[in-house]
Amino acid sequence: MCGNNMSVPLLAEAVTLSGTEKETAAVIFLHGLGDSGHGWADTLTGIQPPYIKFICPHAPQMPVTLNMRMTMPAWFDLMGLSADSPEDESGIKKAADSIKAIIEHEAKNGIPPHRIILGGFSQGGALALYTALTCQHNLAGVVALSCWLPLHRTFPSASNASKNLPILQCHGEMDAMIPCHFGAMTAEKLKIIVDTHMISFKTYPGLSHSSCPQVKAIIIFLIRILLSTAN
């Protein structure tokens, strides 16, 4: 069955890497602030199993308070990067709904939610976490790189996620933009939302706000999770 991508705005413009065999799984990966889907598509091409579709949408252009209201690709507005900074609640929820629309589209076109992984880096990783935890479907897992959990005070009551949702967190120990302790606090929060043994939090000595060494962990996670949920 062929769906109409035009009915899902983010999907219509997304970078989509089709599998070389019958696609039985999908990874939706969300880039960071100021980036585009092309940046991560180039990285993911090198680790793509033949049966997995990769979807790398582009964030919309919007003014970002943190960057002096400059317009740039962003999933939602950022007012600050401290633990007590105000958050763009309506923007976060709107962005999550746009990602859930992609999940629904893939489900209607033959890839069930339990074979879909959400992933992202920095702001994209934050949105991936929030979306997966509030999604009505049980997803295959989440890859959250160098990020945090938005609207963390609303959890666990805001969660619709299965207690068995696998989550891979990776964070550089020298990350000055999103400090590693934010990742550690997020991991602790996640332990009251999903079962503790489903959370893997990996840190990388000497790594700043970057993703390169984390790709190997993504490969292992994808293969382990998607093989365990094979049709």
Image (cartoon, rainbow, N blue to C red):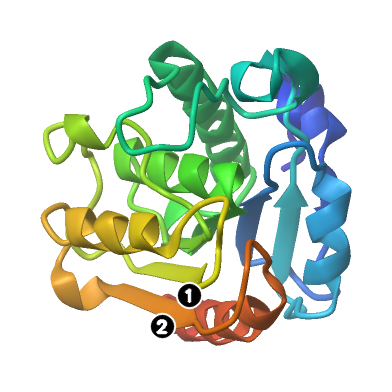
Q: Which residue is mark 2?
A: 228
Label 2 SS: helix
Residue at 77% across / 79% down in the picture?
50
The answer to whether marks 1 and 2 mark residues whose Cβ atoms lie closer than 8 Å is no
In the image, 87 versus 97, the foreground residue is: 87
In the image, 14 versus 110, the foreground residue is: 14
Q: Would residue 199 appear left or right of 192 to someone viewing this image?
A: right
Q: Amino acid at mark 1?
A: Asn
Q: Which residue is mark 1?
A: 231
Q: Would residue 172 appear left or right of 225 to someone viewing this image?
A: right
Q: CA distance from mark 1 to mark 2?
A: 9 Å
Any mark on residue 162, and which? none
Residue 7 occupies quadrant: top right
Figure quadrant of the N terminus? top right
Estimate the x, y position of residue 202 in percent, counting from the top left.
42, 79
Estimate the x, y position of residue 72 in percent, counting from the top left.
79, 24
In the image, 51 versus 27, the foreground residue is: 27
Circle count: 2
Picture layout, residue 122 above or below residue 203: above
Estimate the x, y position of residue 201 in percent, counting from the top left.
36, 74
Q: Would residue 32 appear left or right of 101 to someone viewing this image?
A: right
Q: Would residue 197 appear left or right of 3 to someone viewing this image?
A: left
Q: Is residue 102 visible?
A: yes
Residue at 70% across / 16% down in the picture?
68
Label 1 SS: loop
Q: How would you rate the neighbour count of disc 1 (Cα within 10 Å): few for under 14, some for 14-19, many for 20 or more?
A: few
